[in-house]
Image: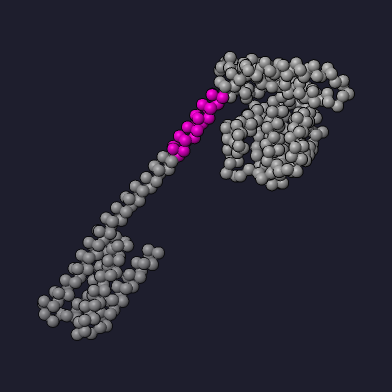
Amino acid sequence: MRKILFAILVLVVICIGMLHFFTPGYLIFYHDMFRRLSYFPIVLGAIWFGVWGGLLLAVMSSIAFIPHVLLYIGEGTGTYLSELTEIVLYIAAGTVTGIIAGRESRLRNRYKALSEKLEKSYDKLHRETQLLLEVEEQLGAAQKLSALGQLSASLAHEIKNPLSSIKGTAEILLDEFPEDHPKREFVEILLKETERLNNTVEEVLQFSRRGMQDEKKEQAETEPLSQVIDRVTSLLASQLQKKNIKLTVTGWEVGKAFFVAGEKLSQVFLNIILNGIDAAPAKGEISIETMKHADGYTVSVKDDGPGIAAEIADKIFNPFYSTKEGGTGLGLSISKKIVESYGGTLTLSDAETGGACFTVFLPKRNSENGVKRQTESEFKNIEGNL
């Protein structure tokens, strides 16, 4: 583009020179107009191409002006020198304009460099501010967790005694129902869940006593994944019935061969399915699908509710973030930590039904040949971290 512009300016200079040459000398008005027109390509050349562009076009304009000067030879020294002065003015105009344009160009480049530097500084400041806000948010969450941990330790002492009473009552009721009684299953569930809650309270108490010391290794009995899902769905049967929600469980046979720590995973599936029940409409549907993969097992829980908006999808696993009125925002956060303590993942995606799909992936670290015991040290003390 610069070459084209320079060529156009040269062509203008040539045209002005030809006009001078072919216009008779006595038409002074036209010659005055032509020589004033010569300043335009000179000035534009100096502005666009700097001092050297202005000088070059001034020299070319002077050469194109020479045939016109020759017309005044013999007209008198004053007239001849007056025309030669125009050449000096051409060169002066090209030089001065080029110097001014060059200075302006350097100043513009300096401002541009300064602007780019300021923009980089602004971006850096913005990133550091964002990082500071994130750190502040994490600090606030840590303070909340610390306060919650202290509160949990206090509440654990108050909860432990009533739990012992509930457990004792459940054991008495269990003796009242024979093995083949249809209600014995519910009493067994009550007893097992009471025991699980008691273990959780005990963990909170132990953590409050130990602080940051190494945790004592404990044993956690494992059970088939399908049995864990069965127990959880039995616990939630009444909630499902209240909203007339249809529950579909597939892949039950697949989960029979995979053994997990049932107490921990029960908490995970309870939280996820309860969220699905809250999200699903009346007479809605929830599906639980267990699948076996080369490196582990997945359990997907899908609902036909409104789903989770993309702008909050990355926040729902954060502690204390909840979209439900009165929610603590800890259920999914704790569930994610429990699953990750197994080396697995808990992810969110969109379900085919339009709702949310929570997928729990568990790697093949457990025995598939029968019930065996694993050390509790393999799993993080989720409640203790609170």
Q: Quadrant of the C terminus?
A: top right
Secondary structure mainly formed by the magenta segment = helix
Find residue 218 and report its horizontal and vertical position in percent.
68, 16
Residue 367 inside the magenta-drawn segment: no
Residue 296's spot in the image, x, y percent? Answer: 72, 32
| Residue 3 to residue 224: above or below | below
Residue occupying image coordinates x 29% and y 79%: 18
Residue 132: x %, y % from top left = 45, 34
Residue lying furthest left in this view? 77
Which quarter of the rendered picture does the N terminus lie within?
bottom left
Is 170 in front, or is 207? 170
Q: Relative to 314, is 352 on the left or the right?
A: right
Q: Residue at x 26, y 61 (%)?
A: 98
Considering every residue shown, the one lying at the far right of the view is: 180
Residue drawn at (70%, 18%), measured in percent from left and top? Answer: 163
Q: Which residues are magenta?
A: 127-148
Q: Nearer the viewer, residue 314 or 293?
A: 314
* Rendering coords of residue 329 (x, y %): 60, 33
Image-quadrant location for residue 188: top right
Front position in the image: 144 or 47: 144
Residue 129 in view in this figure: yes
Q: How many marks?
A: 0
Q: Is residue 313 above or below residue 101?
A: above
Is 143 inside the magenta-drawn segment? yes
- Report whether 89 appears left or right of 231: left
| Residue at the spot 38% in from the left edge and 65% down from the top edge | 3
Viewer-proximal residue among 95 and 144: 144
Instruction: Determine the image quadrant of residue 14.
Output: bottom left
